[in-house]
Each structure stands twice: as C-alpha cells, then as structure tokens.
Image: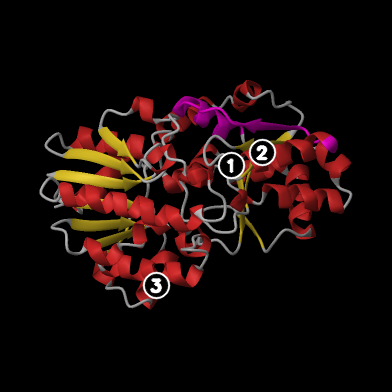
Amino acid sequence: MNILIVGQVDSIFFRDYVSSAITKNDNMYIECYSVTNDLGKFSHEFNFNYRVTSYYSTFIPKIKFFRSFIKPFYIGIELLLYLLLNKNKYNVLHFKWLLPEIVLFSPIYKFFPFKIISTLWGGELESLKLFGSRKLYFLFFKKMVINSSYITVFTHEKEQQLISYNINKLKIKKFLYGSNIISNIEILVSNGNRLHSKSIFNIPDNLISICVGYSGKSLHQQLEFLNFIIRNNLTEEFSSKFFLIFPMTYGFDSNLHDSLLLVLRKFNFKFIILTQKMSDLEVAYLRHSTDIFLQISTFDGLSSSLIEGFLSGSIIICGDWLPYESFKKSGLYFHEIDGLNLSLFKLLDFLYMNFDNEYNKCKVNKNILGFNQTWNNQIGNWLNLYY
C-alpha cells in the first residue's frame, strides 16, 4: 500500500500522523508532498520521504499584485505533473487541508487511478478564497469533495454542512486528531505541581494566566481582545490580575507579532509571546501552566490544543459561534460568551474571584475525555480508510 499525502508538510500533524501510521503498519509506504514552504520547523525530525513545491524558490513570490493569481496555477500544475509521472506509484492520494491550489484542479484528480481522501481542517469555507473569490473557491471545493472517496471532518456541525451540499453521508467520516502531547499532560496533571509549570514561563504565582488562542494566526483575535481592554479603560485592573500568553510557534505572522508586541509594551500588560518551536513536553508544560484558555477564534475545526486544555484542567472560555456542540453533549464544564464585549470581562472577574472553585469544577473534564486521544490510539481509524 503506497500513499501520497499532500498538504502543509512542515507541521506537527505530518510529523506525528505519518510516524504513527508507519509504526502501526510497517507494510505501508508513505510519502508526502508539500504545497507550502519548508521552513525546517519539524521536517528535520521526519522519518519519511517528502518533496516540496518549487514555487517558493522562484522569483514569483516577490511579484506584487499578480502572485495571488499565479500561485494556484503554478503549484497546482506542478502537482498534477508529479502525479502524472507517478500515476502507477501510489494507491491512495490523501489531501490534508484543501488549499485553493489543491481544489483548482479537483475535476482532474478523478482521472488518476488513486483512492482520494480529503481531510477538512474546518475553516476552509470561512477563510479561503480562489483568485480573491470565496464563491469561486466554494465551487471548486464542492467538486473536490464530490470526487473524493472519503472526506474526514472533526465535528458534527461540519458533517451536517457537507450533507447540506448533497454530499453522500456514507463518504463523510468523523475522526479526531491525535495528540502525542497528551501523554505528557497526563503525567503533569497526576503530579499536580501547576506552580512549577508556570515558573517555566516566568508566570508570577499571584497572577492568573490566560492563553489567547493556540497559534500565530490572526483568526484568534488577539489584537481585538487587547484593543477592547484598552478602549474600555480596563488595562490597569486587568494587568493586576492576569498574565497573558500568546502562542505563535506555528502559523507565525510577523506583522501580527510586531503589532501585539507594540500594544502589550505600550500599555504595560504582563505577558509572554512564544515564537520558538517547542517540544511535546514543553507544550504540555504550557497547557498545564494555563489557568484560563480563551478560544475566541472566528472559526475552528476541533483543535487538539483545546482538547489538551480540557485535559490539563484549564478553565475554558469559548465563543458560542464555534462548533463545540459535542462538548456540551458530553457534559464537559466550560464557559461560553457571545462576543468580545463587557460580558467577557464580567466573566473573567467572576473567575478571578472564584478561581479555586471554578478550577475544581474543571477537574471533571479529564475524566470525561480520558487520556486516550493520542495518535497511537486514533491512527487506526484513519488507516482503515486507505484499504
């Protein structure tokens, strides 16, 4: 069984997914093809072969105005040529994250002798455009999923959305991501020394830590959160109670980073911005050191980071627009807000005044979820799709 996985290869997902798959089934041969640049953050740890689009080594990314039109054609055609030259090499073509350059040529993929699997991240339809058009992206996205043998999603809401597009329900599989960080979190939680975890990030014992989002992408509304505090003259009171954590170790945006740093310093917030790659153990310490996990992203699939937050015992605050209905049904204890407004800060004030009680209520979450969502336990569901 030979598989080609296409997507953003220089990532935690590819490192852990492929390694777990190979460990689970040594008769499976997996190669990867990256349609994004290789920044070397995780690829130096790979135990599998991969190739990277040549687009980023050309002069085209430096061309203003036209590069957004050239990029999907260049990367998409290059991938098609590779598939044509290797059409007898692979049994399965697995797309992870349906970028515009992938869906653009989706009508052609069905002519290759591959089983096609499409894995949805969860925010494709909310964030991606083809040639500046969301409607055009949707048109090709729909062709892509129709031509796929299976489509994997993470939430019931996304499953229902696809069904509303007349996608065959039998083709839609609801799987969770695994997380190799969870086993480390289990050890830290059992030891119970949260203050030690906080000391690693120089978080003062007398302040409650708030982790805002889980990546360097602006969809987490980091600046909007800070600006709301500033506009409502809450800065001084906020800084006397809370310590802010901004993880930007992946999805790094230099403009967002610089803007955050400017605002945080100007208004004397107490904070840390994490930009360097972290080991699984370091990420586990981060989750364990987080008192409050603030998830106000404009959209989300069902991130492993949030699951890790629940398991580490953090108090979770989510936007009620996010697809977390399954959390409610399972009985997880968390708070919802309806937007960036004063009700959020009333809630934060309540949590500050009642922190011990609220923290104890969150202990039920690890019992409900359990610590079995590692890739070692989850990978079997994914691999069954290949056969």
Tell whether label 3 touches label 1 (CB within 8 Å): no
Residue position marked by numbered label 2 in the rendering = 257
Above or below, 45 relative to 180 = above
- Give the mark count: 3
Q: Quadrant of residue 50?
A: top left
Find out whether residue 275 is within the magenta segment. Answer: yes
Depth-wise, is mark 3 or mark 2 nearer the camera? Answer: 3
Frontmost residue, 86 versus 356: 86
Residue position marked by numbered label 3 in the rendering = 139
Frontmost residue, 232 versus 208: 232
Question: Upstream in the sequence, badge 3 or badge 2?
Answer: 3
Residue position marked by numbered label 1 in the rendering = 216
Q: Which residues are magenta?
A: 266-289
Secondary element under disc 1, as helix, strand or loop, is loop
- Name the residue type under label 1: Gly
Is 320 placed left or right of 182 in the picture?
A: right
**How far from the left and from the top, in percent, is residue 74?**
37, 52
Secondary element under disc 2, as helix, strand or loop, is helix
**Residue located 86% across and 53% down the image:** 231
Secondary element under disc 3, as helix, strand or loop, is helix
- Name the residue type under label 3: Leu
Q: CA distance from mark 3 to mark 2?
A: 34 Å
Is 272 placed left or right of 109 in the picture?
A: right
Question: Upstream in the sequence, badge 1 or badge 3?
Answer: 3
**How far from the left and from the top, in percent, is residue 3?**
19, 45
